[in-house]
Every structure is written in C-alpha cells, then in structure tokens.
Amino acid sequence: MFKLPTEEEIDLMEGLLNVASDSTRLKILCALLNGEVEPVEKSVSELVVEVGVSQSLVSHQLKVLKDADLVDFRKDKTRSFYYLKDEHVKQLLEVVYDHIREKM
C-alpha cells in the first residue's frame, strides 16, 4: 500500500520530476531508452544528432541529468558514453509514455 510521502520525500520527488520535465532532457532520456528492451549507451555526438540541438546544450543537459542521478557515463579514451542510470529511470519513462498514449 502506498503511504503519503514525507515532506522531504515530496521535495525529492518534485526535484526529480522537474529535472525530467525539460523537453531537451526528456528527449535525451528517450534517446537513451531508444525503444529497446535494454537501454543503450550513446556518445554526446550521437545525442546531438538525435536530439537536434547543439553539443554544448546536450553536454549541459547531460550534466543536469547526471547530477539528478538519472544518467551515468563511461569513458572510452576521449569519448564519453551515456546511459540511463538504472531500471527505475527506464520504468518511469515507459509509464509516462504509456499513460499519454492512452489519451491519444
């Protein structure tokens, strides 16, 4: 049974949802999900092409998403590859997408 969250938990939930509510950040998260069974890794340059914004904007938004613990990365020489942090992020995206698709 779901109990009413504490004020601290509500604040954390609000912060997480605020981070995910930006359209560029949401596009990045969806690009990392990419309709696959398992989330994928993508470089900044791949995300620039898919999301259709500048490299500096993608890099800035990835930092925001990383700080919010929604994405993580691995380094391969000079390139960084980003991926969804965990299964919860994937589930959150899928639930939101399913919810809005029901209304269409």
Image (tube, grey):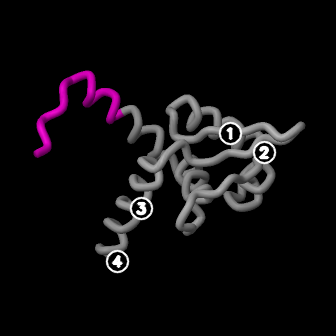
Which contiguous range is marked in magenta? 1-14
- Circle 2 Cα neighbour tier, 10 Å, few/some/many (<14 / 14–19 / ≥20): some
- The residue that appears at 21% across and 23% down in the rendered structure is 7
Q: What's the amino acid at mark 1?
A: Phe
Q: Specify the quadrant of the image occupied by residue 17.
A: top left
Q: Which residue is mark 2?
A: 55
| Horizontal arrangement in the rendering, residue 50 relative to residue 32 (left or right) | right
Residues at marks 4 and 2, CA–CA distance in whole angstroms: 33 Å
Residues at marks 3 and 2, CA–CA distance in whole angstroms: 26 Å
Residues at marks 4 and 3, CA–CA distance in whole angstroms: 16 Å
Q: Nearer the viewer, mark 1 or mark 3?
A: 1
Q: What's the amino acid at mark 2?
A: Gln
For marks 4 and 1 on the same chain, the one whose residue lies earlier in the sequence: 1
Residue 101 in picture, x, y percent from top left:
36, 73
Residues at marks 1 and 3, CA–CA distance in whole angstroms: 21 Å
Quadrant location, the C terminus: bottom left
Q: What's the amino acid at mark 4?
A: Met
Q: What's the amino acid at mark 3?
A: Glu
User: Is residue 56 depicted above or below 29 in this figure?
Assistant: above
Q: Secondary structure at mark 1?
A: strand
Specify the label residue 94 is tagged with: 3
Q: Secondary structure at mark 3?
A: helix
Would residue 15 be counted in the magenta stretch?
A: no
Residues at marks 4 and 1, CA–CA distance in whole angstroms: 34 Å
Q: Which residue is mark 4?
A: 104
Residue 25 in picture, x, y percent from top left:
56, 47
For marks 1 and 3 on the same chain, the one whose residue lies earlier in the sequence: 1
Specify the label residue 73 is tagged with: 1
